[in-house]
Image (cartoon, rainbow, N blue to C red):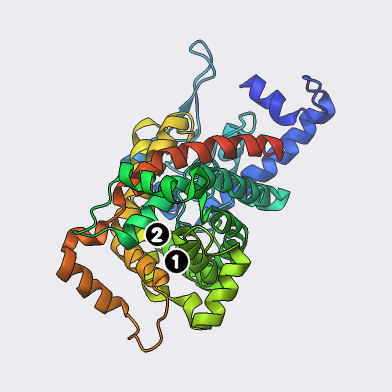
Amino acid sequence: MLQKIVQAGDKDLDGQLDFEEFVHYLQDHEKKLRLVFKSLDKKNDGRIDAQEIMQSLRDLGVKISEQQAEKILKRIRTGHFWGPVTYMDKNGTMTIDWNEWRDYHLLHPVENIPEIILYWKHSTIFDVGENLTVPDEFTVEERQTGMWWRHLVAGGGAGAVSRTCTAPLDRLKVLMQVHASRSNNMCIVGGFTQMIREGGAKSLWRGNGINVLKIAPESAIKFMAYEQIKRLVGSDQETLRIHERLVAGSLAGAIAQSSIYPMEVLKTRMALRKTGQYSGMLDCARKILAREGVAAFYKGYVPNMLGIIPYAGIDLAVYETLKNAWLQRYAVNSADPGVFVLLACGTMSSTCGQLASYPLALVRTRMQAQASIEGAPEVTMSSLFRQILRTEGAFGLYRGLAPNFMKVIPAVSISYVVYENLKITLGVQSR
């Protein structure tokens, strides 16, 4: 504990804590404790009871029983097994006033409720190629110190590396979504062989350039929209409730996707192009505009928007369920889940989210890929669904699912490793 206090208060990084630094640490730490106390004191009566602890954790998506909340109130802290035993609720009233709260935590660099937000970031860290997840929350401290934009930059860089490393699987998925059928049963090995034979090894990365370029505008628009929608929701809490996060995140995702959707169409067309068909992204955009008009850049827009709800909802629900289960069972001294648990939760939630929204994603991709032919009827989402079910059955809605799932684990792992390294480079301190 003493080492943590020295690390927290050592401003000149000389490994020692002088009197001035110690006083500054106490003053700064007391301010933080006051903010946390006020956020927990829902009734504004100067005391925290079990119901208020339950409500505060519920707002973060962590559900506990009243008995567990009472245990928190009676929580025992010891520095060592031979050290003195101290209680937060000193007078046994089953409530905590400001003095009890301050005395208990002042010389303890506490991992309080916002610690859950710090350790359990999800959409910022993990990039599986579909940026439809609900944005992460940032603590008040991260907003005030400007750490939030460094997290976003680190997440964007991690996404760029992750998407580039898994681009061959992503292109194979697009090819299988568009071209695979009962008569053309494209397999993974055959698909890779066909791509290399047609355009060489370099062709495996077709469409990756625009896929990486759209990360920055999409993430920025999504984050700004999310912050504005949070204010419209009217919540004055540091974090939103789960259903509020889903609504705000889905709307922010819809705004971001609407803004960059022409880039999604370009990505699909670039991934499907033959050798020599386009000289680059701009040439592809010019030819689409000349032959098909502006409307071509919004083909598949409706199924894409509809896919946000099941993807974001399932992803958030699964992630929060796994997070709650871990926090209730294993979070004794810290909310830090460790690398393996974080990767496992991110992988499972992303996989479930993609599985739920995959038929809509497949229909969107097929609509994006269809070049307008003069005199040909415009294919609608419902007619394409019926056509696929009639000719290929329900299985046809899941073409390309294998390479899509194959890229999830490497994508999550790569984005996490790169994210952690970029955090160090950008000066983001991990607690």
Q: Which residue is at the front of the view, 134 or 379?
A: 379
Which residue was labeled with disc 2? 312
Residue at position x 51%, y 41% in the image: 165
For numbered disc 2, what is the local secondary structure?
helix
For marks 1 and 2 on the same chain, the one whose residue lies earlier in the sequence: 1
For numbered disc 1, what is the local secondary structure?
helix
Q: Which residue is at the front of the view, 11 or 308?
A: 308
Can you say whether 328 is above or below 6 in the image? below
Amino acid type for the residue under numbered disc 1: Ser
* Quadrant of the rendering where the C terminus is positioned: top right
Q: Residues within 10 Å of mark 2 (few under 14, many from 20)?
A: many
In three-dimensional space, the C-alpha distance between marks 1 and 2, rounded to whole angstroms, equals 7 Å
| CB atoms of marks 1 and 2 within 8 Å | yes
Which residue was labeled with disc 1? 250
Q: Which residue is at the front of the view, 87 or 419?
A: 419
Q: Is residue 385 left or right of residue 257?
A: left
Amino acid type for the residue under numbered disc 2: Ala
Q: Is residue 90 left or right of residue 390?
A: right
Q: Residues within 10 Å of mark 1 (few under 14, many from 20)?
A: many
Q: Is residue 11 visible?
A: yes
Q: Is residue 66 visible?
A: no
Residue at position x 47%, y 28% in the image: 333
Residue at position x 17%, y 62% in the image: 394
